[in-house]
Image: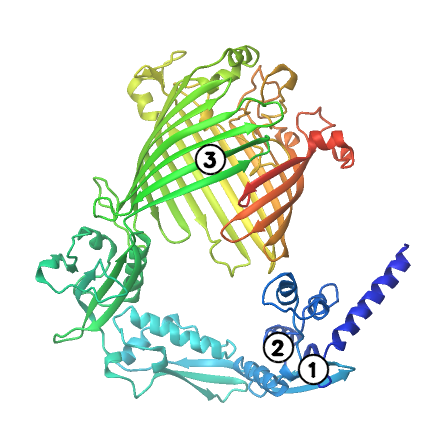
Amino acid sequence: MNKLQLIYVLLILAITASCSNTKYLSADELLYTGAKLKVEGNEITHKQQKILQDQLEDLIRPKPNSKIFGLRFRLFLYNIVGESKKDKGFRYWLKNKVGEPPVIYKQVDKEYTASVLQNFAENKGYFYAVSIADSTRSGKKVKVFYTVEPKNQYFIRKVLFPDDTIGIGKAVYATSMQSLLKPNQPYSLETIKEERARIDARLKEEGYYYFNPDYLIVEVYKSDEPYKVDLSVKVKREIPELSKVQYKINKIVVYPDYNIGADSIASSSDSIVRYKDFTIVDPDKIFKPQIFDKTLLFKKGDYYNRTNHNLSLNRLVNIGAFKFVKNQFRTADTSGNFLDAYYYLTPLPKKSIRVELLAKTNSANYTGTELNLNWSNRNTFHGAELLTISVFGGMEVQVSGQNDGFNVYRIGTEANLILPGIISPFNFESTSRYIPRTKATLGYEYQDRRKLYVLQTFRASFGYLWKENERKEHQLSITEVTYVSPHNVTNIYKEQIALIPTLSKVIEKHLIFGPTYSYTYTNTMQTKRKNTVYYISTFDIAGNIAGLLTGANSRKNKVIEVFGVPFSQYAKVENEFRNYLKLGTESQLASRIIIGAGFAYGNSEEIPFIKQLFIGGTNSIRAFQARSIGPGTYKMAVDSVYFLPDESGDIKLELNTEFRFGIYRFFKGALFIDAGNIWLLNDNKDKPGSGFSNDFLNEIAIGTGIGFRFDFSFLVLRADFAFPVRKPHLPDGQRLVLDEIDFGKRSWRKENLVFNLAIGYPF
């Protein structure tokens, strides 16, 4: 079939689908095919017309049946499927979920829509706008036309506030410096509403608890200047007396064991505890009183303010001990203007257990399972402490490939205790919505790499977590200790060490202790933003204090040991930046860059293996197997080894870009390109080409591919098909392998096509 014949076929299909959509309508029904809006007039600029037209088009209702490549395919599908006898099954799903019922012309109210368009234009300052609606019919189809003719737009000349010297009028005037209503700005009803809300919010900060935005009025006067108006902000005359006065906090009463479904408020004096400014009604002594002093920001005698109101509620929610948080303020039965604050808190179940069974596979052809058992106690010492004890075990098996038979078995446990507040000799208070936390961790892992070695790892840390706000988070481990001890090293591995000496670093016994710090910034939770970012920076510094105490910093060619184990000294920093750019309702461009570097000094010649940098794999450069790239241009001769060891480096650069798009509902797709490599700070004679140099950009690995995601909101299952387009280990000038791509060739697919199956997005 040539191109001309294909065009004819498509044209016939389009006409057929178009006609068939109207033949299903009854005799008195017409298909509404949409509306066309025109903003015209000589009294406003072309730019004003364009802005107004974009705003007005969003208001037109109803929307016509959707089109795909110019065809109303969903309507066509709805029509040809026919009626379903049951409210379930494939036919019902195809008709009502995939298909789309016709939008009938009777559903269109032209005059009402025209009035909506006119009102909107007037609310934007085009006070004498005119809106007209008309329609045309062609067969059984109707199209509607709207014409809006705005006159000159009115601007603000001046804004007046109350000139009262006392009371509520004075308080309103005090907010005028931050007014949203500015001279020479276009008149806008929406801005006036926002101004009333702004003044109300400011008054709430000053104790005016019973004030309301509806108690304000903004009067509009036509000024002497053409197309200008004067605005006067006033407090309405008839408003409740309660709204005119400032209130202070009197009693603060907390019910920490409140049952939302029953009257569970205790009244016995034995159940009441008075702590500082708080009255706590807790008959069973479930919570220590101190926890409420950390979470509630109001003190007796404070003026009411909305900030402390909302922050206190947020802190109670974020502490993680309560299922429901309810708050009331009541006028106190005392002389003066006072409020009593009541907090009704419903605790979460104190203890819980969760079991997770995971199946996983990665680009190194390892397939395995993992079982996690997690036990939690949300109020361990009656101070909203969270104790979590986890036990995990798993295995990974390579069913084919270089590592066939070198299976990995893991078992371990970890205990985490998170306490609200900062436990330290220094006074540390936070007034953010998030209570800072103290975290202590103790963990152990036993890893058996069959035919190779066994590693036992002990970890302990103590530090702090705190959030400035929902975007900025800090985590500081004052001390973090890691002890790695190897066992049962096999002859196979020892033989490989003779060929590749760097493999000995994996099984070295070592001790790591020192502070770590990470900073995270993200605004990805702001879903209405077109452009969002995520950034995390991690600093890891080990062995400095021990180096000073033992003199390891000044001793040459001598390794100092602590308890018979060498301790590591190094500094490492890693930065990851992500950007998410919305291109449409179902599409976005996601990008990531990772830059990391570390160096050893003092008591160490190299960074410990578990702290080194790796690249490649399911969540990295997907066209290469996990940890198989680099360092630099180095590539191990596969024929000389029994297994593929993990390659690591001191410097890392990685870039990823992924175009994500919707296909159908939960089924989504992606096109991606990944690039990067790792390097050693200095060339290693056992790994030629591994050192970092000025030519590092010429040593970048690049891969690309296509992916499919099944996004069920609670679970994302991802399948990526990737292949390399640039291989850094090849000779210079031959690294770009685009001309070798041949999907039809089995040998090429076997060597280059990598399948990644994973849970969650790669970034």
Q: Are marks 3 and 2 in contact (CB under 8 Å)?
A: no
Which sits earlier in the primary sequence, circle 3 or circle 2?
A: 2
**Looking at the picture, how far across and down is residue 658, in whole percent?**
62, 46
Q: Which residue is mark 1?
A: 145
Mark 1 to mark 3 CA distance (whole Å): 62 Å
Along the line of sight, which residue is nearer the eye, 246 or 479?
A: 479
Residue 475, quarter of the rendered image: top left
Along the line of sight, which residue is nearer the eye, 480 or 305?
A: 480
Please rate how many residues cluster around mark 1, counting C-alpha atoms within 10 Å: few if below 14, some from 14 to 19, many from 20: some
Nearest to the eye among marks 2 and 1: give it.
2
**Dot 1: what SS?**
strand
Which sits earlier in the primary sequence, circle 1 or circle 3?
A: 1
Mark 3 to mark 2 CA distance (whole Å): 51 Å
What residue type is disc 3 on? Glu
Q: Which residue is mark 3?
A: 370
Q: Which residue is mark 2?
A: 62
**Looking at the picture, how far across and down is residue 386, in whole percent?**
29, 45
Along the line of sight, which residue is nearer the eye, 251 or 74?
A: 74
